[in-house]
Image: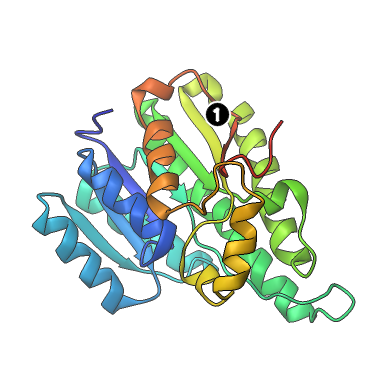
Amino acid sequence: MSLSGRVAFVTGASQGIGRACAMKLAAEGANVAIAARNQEKLNELVDEITAAGGTALPCVLDVTDEEQVKVSIKHAVTQFGKIDILVNNAGITRDQLVMRMKHADWDAVLDTNLTSAYLCIQQVTTSMLKQRWGRIINISSVFGQMGQAGQANYAASKAGLIGLTMAVARELGSRNITCNAVAPGFIETAMTEVLGEEFKQNAAKQIPLGRVGSPSDVASAVAFLASDEASYITGHVLNVNGGMLMG
């Protein structure tokens, strides 16, 4: 699954799934532009990728800011000459029962998790159309497929990513640009760390494979969809959930 000569842009790359995706794509040979708000964590990731023989460009970016998105993607294109692969991974949670959810928390989650993907797709499309090759991969969630109490905003944003994926796949397919989604289940990240050991153990009992997933499990799926081996797959939602949701 060599990605030698490819250029990837990964959002939410400073930790968790985004970090694992950036490292995996770099390990497969891609030059990687890594975007997040935390400069220090980005610099640490650049050092790690460089030490392993890869090439990474840090982009300090608030994905909800359209102008920052434009500037960062333009910067990556200037540095690397193009963008072949876009991984829309940036995401947040602001959990609350829907009857008590603040409008600001609804907007924050939708803006970060869904609108940012639209903004990034819009900006990379020119580069992909020019070369008639592209891979757009949106990180959705099992909860965008089955819902989750207390996460109406998060579930809606992740379900929206699936709809966006299919629409973009239809729009860009004729130009050899694929658009797919990866829907992780319960993954061990900073976002799930706060849930406590008992909760995690109970969650694992509901998963046929008997364990929670790791960021690298998701990154491997992303790397596959970014490769030539996945050239005839588009508009697809690849479940990486240990069997938590089937069908």
Q: Residue at x 31, y 52 (%)?
A: 22
Image side of residue 109 versus residue 39, left or right:
right
Q: Is 229 or 124 nearer to us in this picture?
A: 229
- Classed neighbour count for the residue bearing mark 1: other residues with Cα under 10 Å, few (<14), some (14–19), many (≥20): some
Toward the right, the furthest residue is: 99
Above or below 7: residue 94: below
Q: Is 138 or 244 nearer to us in this picture?
A: 244
User: How is colour applied across the structure in the image?
Assistant: rainbow
Above or below 40: residue 116: above
The x and y percentages for residue 134 are: 41, 32
- The quarter of the picture where residue 113 lies is bottom right
* Quadrant in the picture for the N terminus: top left
Above or below 103: residue 74: above
Q: Is 15 or 121 nearer to us in this picture?
A: 15
The x and y percentages for residue 201 are: 58, 63
Q: Residue at x 54, y 35 (%)?
A: 180
Q: Is 167 or 54 nearer to us in this picture?
A: 54
Above or below 37: residue 89: above
- The quarter of the picture where residue 29 lies is top left
Q: Residue at x 54, y 77 (%)?
A: 194
Q: Can the viewer see residue 107? A: yes
The x and y percentages for residue 240 are: 54, 42
Image side of residue 22 versus residue 4, left or right:
right
Residue named by callout 1: 172
The x and y percentages for residue 24 are: 29, 46
Task: Count all numbered tags in the image, as a single digit.
Answer: 1
* Quadrant in the picture for the C terminus: top right
Q: Residue at x 52, y 65 (%)?
A: 66
Name the element at disc 1: helix
The three-letter code of the residue at mark 1 reads: Leu
Q: Can the viewer see residue 114? A: no
